[in-house]
Image (tube, rainbow, N blue to C red):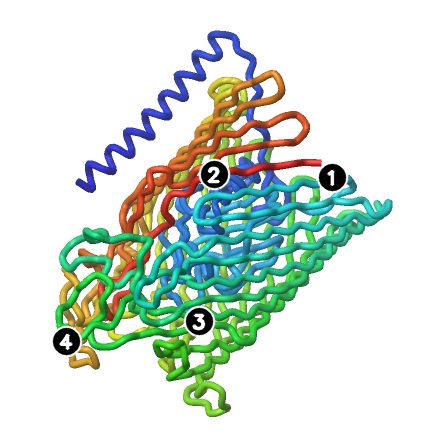
Amino acid sequence: MKLFGKNILVLSIQAALLTSLSSFAYAEDAGEEAKGLETITVTAQKRIQTVKEVPATVTAISSDNIKDYLGAGENIRALAGRVPSLQIESSNGRQSPRFYIRGLGNTDFDVNANQPVSLVLDEVALENSVLKGIPLFDIERVEVLNGPQGTLFGRNTPAGIVKVETVAPDFNNDGYTRFGFGNRGTMFAEGAINAELSDTVAARISVKHQERDAWVTNPVRNEEVGGYEELAYRLQFLFDNGSGTKALFKIHGFDQDGDMAQIFYGNALKLGSEGLREGFDEAVMYHDSPGGFNMEHNGASLKIDHEFDEVTLTSVTAYDAVKSWSYADIDGANTDFSGVPNQLGKQLWFNVASGDGLSDHYQFTQELRISGELNNLYYQTGLYFFKEDYTVDNKDLDTNGETTNFYQIDQVTTSSAIFGQIEYKTSKQFAITAGLRYTQDDKELDIRNGGSSTILFEIDKDDSYVNWDLSARYIFNDDWTGFARVGNASRGPVTIGRFGFPSEADTETLTSYEIGLKSDLFDGNARWNVTAYTYDIEDHQLTATGGEANTNSLINADNTFGAGVETSLEAIITDNFRVNMNLSYNKTEIQDKTLKTERCSSTPICTTSDPIANTVPGPFGDVTTVYINGNPLPRAPEWLANINLNYEIPVETGLIVLQTDWNYRSDSNIFLYESTEFVAEARWIGGIRIAYQNDSGFELAVVGRNVTDKVVVDGAVDFLNLSAFVNEPSYWGVEALFEF
């Protein structure tokens, strides 16, 4: 059945491609006047280029598409699958998203977990997973850079980068306001005002408020949960006196409160079966402990560009601080003493609830670089410094939410680097790009009894490493460009200490090889890109989550192999009809014959096929470890696809716009081991949008997300029972936009 499903997916994409190409031919024969696709510029190499000029796989998500995907109370996770090979998930709900590109990510749910996909906001890398939950509003575009980005962006980029560019001030007086409401009491309002304050100073203020009512019933505690409230702002000042100096100063903040970060459904899975069990209802849960979450993020940045005669000097300085707290009934169920295992909403013998948060945090970054162009040579080189200092709180809680066990983890990370890149054009058709970066990382971690200065354990790890890349771009003609790229990136040494259990892993290094084609077809009415890649990761850092207890442990695999193909097509079929689609296939494999990890807990044992390494007594029954050699990476679906169709109907006063998008994800293991039960299920998720627009900047739309109400397993907790969490159910709402 899995193979059949993949064939249907491929045939659907092929049919859509053939239909599109046939329509192009028909349109040209009929002599229709085509508008042509707009040129997309990106800053993937820290300078403004078109996508075709970048010798790497880069995909941009437009501001309009971002608005469509996020209009239903969604957050940054809604971008998952919208470009080739991008996956986003979280076991902390609206906090701490985890990013995956080409199957590579980190399943660690700890708030100090280190990820191989970097999130860069306005040229500032946001390190901590809590920071990565930024709301997207007033966005210029999102760029996704697939593959290692170790030269220009440095550490923690073996898999790639999600690069967010917000709308910057300019010397105009304009703005917009946008709001919407829908089911489950979902409401949002956002807006921005841009103003010319003088001949040399412009400002822009952007604000977004979002909230949702509680919608999940908990009969155990006689309450309803699932509600949240969020407020974010951004204030920017641009200075430009026309003399070659530009300065952009930004302050931003994000406040978040809610009554349940992630809803865990105890024993939502049935032993020996894949998928949600019969009788499951996402609107009902059975927790006997309270939950909630809050977060406060504030930051500031200053970017200065100064153009000398032949050189541009750029400085980017940033400071971010965040406090967060999230707690929940982790077993997702009501304590039961019947002795009958695997009952929906029931947990045998005892309750487990815990909370995690950042009680004290800041990160500081400074980048200084120079760039210039001499004849056919473009160069840039720079220095980079990063420091992060924080305290993590880990607390066990009782059914009243009171602390029963408390640990604190202090960690300081410092990183410094020197980097450079050159591009040399040997002719109008051929260009070679080479980059090099030297990085020094240091991590200091200590574990304390919570609220005291008593240090229980210390870890001090440091490493230095060199990353490089080499690529070539060849312009065959006005329509076709090809590229080849080989390069690597590293994730420096990592440390964690959840609930007093210290763990560490050495530096990993990924080396990737890829080739690709980028094309403009049918007189600029279509763009088609395709990339094939393969990679190996030496000393791959993996996180073994759960198993015996509510903790994580770090391990290094000797090698991990990956390979795949990514393709995207954007096309104007007629003046009124536009198609945007992408498809990616990613194959991953852990290659280490001695590597083993704990499988699911003993209450009950899940159904696994991995070879057993050993079994020892544990606090809740026997603890079994299994070999994971040959397994795919967790949270790495082989197939991802997205189809977006947009049709415009002119009317006397404006346009009626009909839009639908469908997103596919194949199934994947949730943990390092393979089991029948712990599988993130395959699914199609569809959305529709019907909007009226006029020339005065007014829009009114009816929107639907997950219109088929497809609810499947998105993740799980494995150390107590067959607990799971799921995706959002269907949403219907109304949105309005006013531009001025």
Q: Does label 1 or label 3 sit earlier along the sequence?
A: 1
Residue 415 is situated, as x and y percent measured from the top left of the image, at: 56, 70
User: Which quadrant of the view contains residue 260?
Assistant: bottom left
Q: Does label 2 or label 1 sit earlier along the sequence?
A: 1
Element class at badge 2:
strand
**Residue highlighted by disc 4:** 615
Residue 391 visible in rendering: yes
Q: Which mark is residue 174?
A: 1
Residue appearing at x 56%, y 59% in the figure: 125
Specify few, some or many for label 4: CA neighbours under 10 Å numbering under 14, 14-19, or 20 or more.
few
From mark 3 to mark 2, how far is it between C-alphas? 32 Å
**Residue highlighted by disc 2:** 483
Element class at badge 4:
strand
* Residue type pointed to by label 4: Thr
Q: Which mark is residue 250?
A: none
Residue appearing at x 62%, y 48% in the figure: 166
**Residue highlighted by disc 3:** 493
Residue appearing at x 61%, y 49% in the figure: 46
The residue sitting at the top extreme is 30
- Answer whether labels 4 and 1 touch (C-beta < 8 Å): no
From mark 1 to mark 3, how far is it between C-alphas? 47 Å
Residue 218 is situated, as x and y percent measured from the top left of the image, at: 33, 62
From mark 2 to mark 1, how far is it between C-alphas? 41 Å
